[in-house]
Amino acid sequence: MLRVQSAATEQLTEGDQEVKLIIATIKPYKLEDVREALTGIGVRGMMVSEIKGFGAQSGHTEIYRGAEYAVNYVPKIKLEIAVPADMADSIVETITNTARTGKIGDGKIFVLDLAQAVRVRTGETGPEAL
């Protein structure tokens, strides 16, 4: 089958491979260690959000004023880091090694192609916008 690709589609495909978005969920008390490790390998910024979720951990129970309550969502920290594609593997490795406790609930890391990045102040795009 012959495949024809337009210039616009080809440009988008090339752009997808220039910048990656790394989304990581980690335990809250590991945030500062991960931030220091990422700064040490050249990460210049990231977005941090407090989130709640569940996975294999499936929540836990707590006792408050003598009554037991089921806590179905576990507090986590979500990191979002836009990086040049050539840095993605080292960043994933750094987060994995720094956030790992060996216990259930250490988190997850997702790496996505980022179609576009724009620095609002200057209008720079792609890796220059990071």
Image (cartoon, helix red, strand yellow):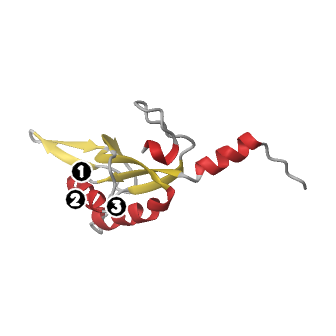
Alpha carbons under labels 3 and 2: distance apart = 9 Å
Alpha carbons under labels 1 and 3: distance apart = 13 Å
Q: Where is residue 5 in the image (x, y as percent from the top left)?
A: 80, 47
Badge 2: few (under 14), some or many (20 or more) residues near its Cα, within 10 Å?
few
For the image shown, how many numbered marks are present on the structure? 3
Label 3, on which residue?
A: 95
**Is 35 above or below relative to 80?**
below
Please tell me which residue lies in front, 90 or 64.
90
Badge 3: few (under 14), some or many (20 or more) residues near its Cα, within 10 Å?
many
Q: Where is residue 59 in the image (x, y as percent from the top left)?
A: 31, 49
What kind of element bears circle 3? helix
* Among numbered discs 1 and 3, the one appearing first in the sequence: 1
Q: Position of residue 98 (x, y in %)?
A: 28, 64
What kind of element bears circle 1? helix
What kind of element bears circle 2? helix
Residue type marked 2: Asp
> Seen in the image, is 38 located left or right of residue 90?
left
Q: Residue 115 carries which label?
A: none
Please tell me which residue lies in front, 85 or 109.
85
Residue type marked 3: Ile
Q: Residue 33 carries which label?
A: 2
Label 1, on which residue?
A: 28
